[in-house]
Amino acid sequence: MKNISVIGSGTMGNGIAHVFAQAGFNVNLIDINQDALAKAMAVITKNLDRLLSKERISVTQKEETLARLATSTDMKKSVTNADLVVEAATENETLKLKIFKQLDEFCPEKTILATNTSSISITKIAAVTTRPEKVIGMHFMNPVPIMKLVEIIRGYKTSDQVTKTIMETSQALKKVPVEVNDYPGFVANRILMPMINEAIISLREGVAGVYEIDTVMKLGMAHPMGPLQLADFIGLDVCLAIMEVLYAGMGKDKYAPDPLLVNMVAAGNLGRKSGEGFYSWTHGTKELIVSKNFNS
């Protein structure tokens, strides 16, 4: 592994590009929007400066990391020499299937195709390619430069050698890879999202308020942030999409997204990304929103 292409320059994409470049890989960060790429590079530079201020990297390491990063809006041109492509586009199945069809056409036969999907079937994504044995999930956690876990998801036809290569590559990033099989939600979101959904149900039913629910989980269960704050951080639209995948895949009522979550997404209250969710995120601050609409 030497040349890495990352598709999508959003929060996850720029984080993935950052850690690969910092670990010594040559990285092409690809997006359809040049402004998004410029913003991504600014975020990466800011995050490197933060590491520099904490003396976790040197000035030379920062400069070398940035030198290994290139950006492009031309996916076909930018994946022709890729040893590995990591797709980190929006969590939308139709879009991901389209991207993987294109990658299968554009990439050399040797290229391993990975997706950062948090819930969509690796097997289904692999099925639109002619190389299902080389398709695998690399589910990084947010924020990517900080979080150690990478959930490595094997599709039905993913080969042992590709799995071994991606496990070793993840270790080269100083991450901790954990191999799981391709079932709805994998492990992380199969456990996490029903917990978040249950917190939303508890809020809607008036069991407790936002602050109280989050405080119980932080102080009682030693979680770094409560489930409602975490939902805002992830994005309520993403939480809803994952719950819908779980519900469709499992067919059990316990995976049905709560109506409050559905309504908040429909109203555009998506959490931190929109400035308002269970909390207000205006001007970078977090303040509790008191709303009668939280209760039935």
Image: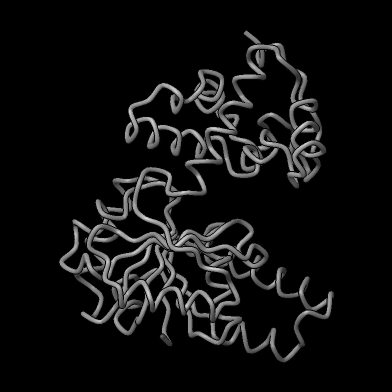
Query: At which x and y percent is residue 77?
Result: 31, 78
Residue plotted at (73% across, 44% down) = 223
Frontmost residue, 236 versus 275: 236
User: Residue shown at 34%/52% (left/top)?
Assistant: 182
The quarter of the image holding the C terminus is top right
Which corner quadrant holds the N terminus?
bottom left
Where residue 172 appears, x then y in whole percent? Answer: 54, 81
Which quadrant of the view contains residue 231? top right
> Against 21, is 181 above or below?
above
Nearest the viewer among 254 and 278 is 254
Front residue of 37/124: it is 124
Is residue 25 shown left or right of residue 61?
A: left
The quadrant in which residue 278 appears is: top right
Residue drawn at 23 percent across, 73 percent down: 106
The reply, left or right, for residue 290 in relation to residue 294 is right
Query: Residue furthest toward the bottom?
Result: 60
Visible in this render: residue 2?
yes
Q: Residue at x 71, y 11 (%)?
A: 292
Q: How is the image coloured?
A: one colour
User: In the image, 46: left or right of 122?
Assistant: right
- Give coordinates of residue 284: x percent, y percent: 78, 46
Q: Is residue 32 visible?
A: no
**In the rendered image, the vertical position of residue 290 relative to residue 292, given as above or below:** below
Give above or below for 209 relative to 93.
above
Residue extending furthest toward the top: 296
Residue 271 is situated, as x and y percent measured from the top left of the image, at 64, 36
Above or below, 33 against 202 in this view is below
